[in-house]
Image (cartoon, grey):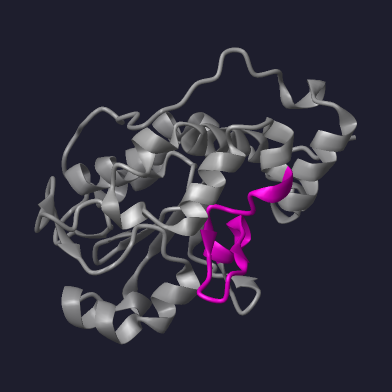
Amino acid sequence: MVINPDVLFLHIPKTSGTSCTDYLCQTLKGPVFLSSLLYRTTSVHFRASVIPGFSHETLEEITGARADIEKSTGILLDNIRLIVAVLRHPYDIELSNYHFYRNGNHNLLGHEMFRNARAEWRIGLAQGSFADFVANSGHFRVRSDGSDIRCEDYLLVGGKLDPRIRLLRAESVSTDFPRLLEPYTEAAVEFPFTNRSRWEDAPPFDALDRELQQLIYLKHKWVFDHGYYGAPS
């Protein structure tokens, strides 16, 4: 999460969120605040002050923590003018998640905060086939009761989208994000592609076998059914 008096950025995992975070922490008009596990060792990230949190808060969680957030930032959530998040094709999300855990000894186990049984299980699962990983790995975050946090769960409160939310697509984020945020920024920097992943040998979604397409569709049904990306025919 990144927040200033006008903007709230929701970081949906595997959707260019680190790039968006770095861009906002360099360009947003102050005061700017960042909640992230990765930056717990410092009090600032670029121009943003670091506050308690863990990067991938849902809007429902942020709303539930309203009092703490408003106390630590001085920002009233009701006065936020723009809530922005980025969506990415579910196939690319699954590929990114798969490779993230496939390289888990580098991405995860090197950080003490990520050393847990679930991470180790996913690392093991990712050593197998992509199809098995899609079918069995669940989603990137889980609730305390073990249930998955799906893409739409980062956005919906009481089953509804806040009218202030604007959803962009990762495929055009490098141009669309700066354009949308321009009224709220005061510095000009090139949009950074932090942790950008590429898999040149991955076939296009339409070329996947029908069963794998359906697995991905059912796992990300809300994103497909709301027309953000084309569902398999």
Image position of 100 (left or right of 67):
right
Q: Position of residue 11 (x, y in %)?
A: 42, 53
Who's the residue at 31% across and 31% down the image?
Answer: 191
In the image, residue 125 lies in the stretch drawn in magenta: no
In the image, residue 136 lies in the stretch drawn in magenta: yes
- In this picture, which residue range is highlighted in magenta? 135-155
Quadrant containing the N terminus is: bottom left
Image height check: is 92 above or below 221? above
Q: Nearer the viewer, residue 123 or 39?
A: 123
Q: How many marks?
A: 0
Q: Quadrant of residue 189?
A: top left
Q: Residue furthest left?
A: 43
Who's the residue at 42% across and 57% down the image?
Answer: 116
Who's the residue at 61% across and 79% down the image?
Answer: 158
Quadrant containing the C terminus is: top right
Q: Position of residue 171 (x, y in %)?
A: 54, 30
Image position of 146 (left or right of 216):
left
Image position of 124 (left or right of 104):
right
Who's the residue at 60% across and 54% down the image?
Answer: 139
